[in-house]
Amino acid sequence: MAHPHPIRASIVLCDRLYNRSGSIRTKKHACKTAILELCGWVETETDIILSNHATRRLSEPAEKNGFEEKLRRNSGFEYRKHLKNLLVDIEGRVGFLEIEAAMDQVKRQGLEGALSSLKPLRNDAAHTHLQAAQEQYWAPSITIRTFDTIEAGLRELDARLAERL
């Protein structure tokens, strides 16, 4: 039997805490932690996918170094604003459109939608303390489903990128 993804397991732990606690404060902590875990994983995972693809596709050291520097400066994970622009740097606009067309569209649209809906929650969770939070956080069970959607989309993207060798 396959082992659960460590980040998914961490979010599941938050879900258990959320469901077992009678404290509103503890429930909020569980929700916020689950969202931050997911967002940290998304940023790390997209960096790995993009860096690996750049290593395979960019032949000149200066191109690779320039891309890696741009990747280090990137702090977002929105599909259109960040992921697309970084892939266009590697593949060009036409190459990016070919990659999108080759993807399972349900997974691609799921990835794009999940990343967009996660952004305001991430910003609030990352930049405020619990009392100042403006957003109502998702229950960890929703964050688990969002993880599953994003993971499927990133796996699909990575598979299509690997085909472009």
Image (spheres, rainbow, N blue to C red):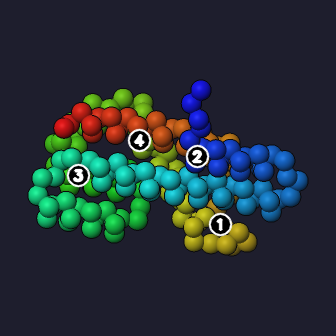
Q: Any mark on residue 6, and which?
A: 2
1 or 3: tag closer to the N-terminus: 3
**Considering the image in quadrants, where does the N terminus appear?**
top right
Q: Are marks 2 and 1 in contact (CB under 8 Å)?
A: no
In the visual, does 32 lie left or right of 111? right
Q: Position of residue 90 (x, y in %)?
A: 20, 51
Q: CA distance from mark 4 to mark 2?
A: 16 Å
Q: Position of residue 40 (x, y in %)?
A: 51, 58
Label 4: which secondary element: helix
The residue where tag 1 is placed is 134
Whether residue 148 is visible, yes or no, is yes
Specify the quadrant of the image occupied by residue 132: bottom right
Q: Which mark is residue 55?
A: 3
Residue type beneath disc 2: Pro
When asked about the image quadrant of residue 98, the answer is top left
Binning the other alpha carbons within 10 Å of mark 1 as few (below 14), some (14 to 19) or many (20 upward) gives few
User: Which amino acid does the dot numbered 1 rest on?
Assistant: Gln
Marks 1 and 3, Cα distance to the nearest angstrom? 40 Å
Task: Determine whether label 3 and label 2 are within 8 Å by CB.
Answer: no
90 shown above or below 144: below
Can I make out residue 93 in this image?
A: no
Is there CB contact under 8 Å for labels 4 and 2?
no
Disc 4: which residue = 154
How many neighbours does mark 2 have within 10 angstroms: few (below 14), some (14-19), or many (20 or more)?
few
Q: Position of residue 7 (x, y in %)?
A: 58, 48
Local crowd at mark 3 within 10 Å, few (<14), some, or many (≥20)?
Answer: some
Q: Is residue 31 above or below residue 164?
A: below
Choose mark 1 or mark 3, whichever is in front: 3
Q: Name the residue located 78 percent from the left edge and 56 percent from the top edge.
A: 27
